[in-house]
Amino acid sequence: MFRAAVLYLCLGVLVTPSLAAPARKPKLNMGAYPSLALPPARVLVTAELVGGEDDENAYCPELEWDWADGSRSVQGSDCSPPDSPQKAPLERRFSARHRFSLPGQYWVALRLRLAGRVVREGGVRILIQGPSQD
C-alpha cells in the first residue's frame, strides 16, 4: 500500500474520488384540462420537464402518447443535431389534445424516446363520467 502511494506521488498522479455531484435528471410532470369531464370530452394533456439540468438524453425526443382508450399517437422530432451550431434549446413543455367518447378512468401516458429508447415517462389520470353521447 505504501509503495503504491509513493509510486503515485512520484508519477505526479493524485487519486481522489470525484467531487462533482452527479447531474440531476429532469422530472416529467403532467396535467390534464379538464381532468374530470362528461363524454364526449376533448382534453388537453400537458407535460413539462421540471428541475434538473438540460440533459442531452432528453434533447429533441420523439413523443409517444398512450391515451388508454386503445389509441396512441406519435409526434416525431424535427431538430438540428445536438452538436449543430443551430442546436435548439432543450424543449421542456409538450402538449396534445384527445377526445374521449366513453365514460371511464384513463391513465394517459407520455413516453419520450430517443433512438427507440424511453428516456423519460410520466402519466396523468383522467376521469370521464356519465353516459356515452356517441
Image (cartoon, rainbow, N blue to C red):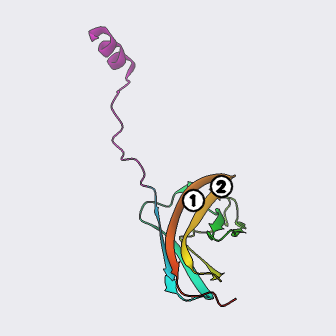
Q: Earlier in the sequence, mark 1 or mark 2?
A: 1
Furthest residue toward front: 131
Reply yes or no: does residue 17 show up in magenta. Answer: yes
Q: What amino acid is at disc 2?
A: Leu
Task: Give the residues in magenta.
Answer: 1-24
- Contact (Cβ within 8 Å) of mark 1 with mark 2: yes
Rendered location of residue 103, percent (x, y) = 58, 81
Reply yes or no: does residue 8 show up in magenta. Answer: yes
> On screen, 99 above or below 14?
below
Kindly state the secondary structure of the residue where label 1 is placed: helix
> Is 78 in front, or is 76?
76
Kindly state the secondary structure of the residue where label 2 is placed: strand
Rendered location of residue 25, percent (x, y) = 45, 56
Would you name the residue on which mark 1 appears?
58
Separation of disc 1 and disc 2 at Cα?
A: 8 Å
> Is 58 in front, or is 64?
64
> Is 41 in front, or is 31?
41
Q: Quadrant of residue 58?
A: bottom right
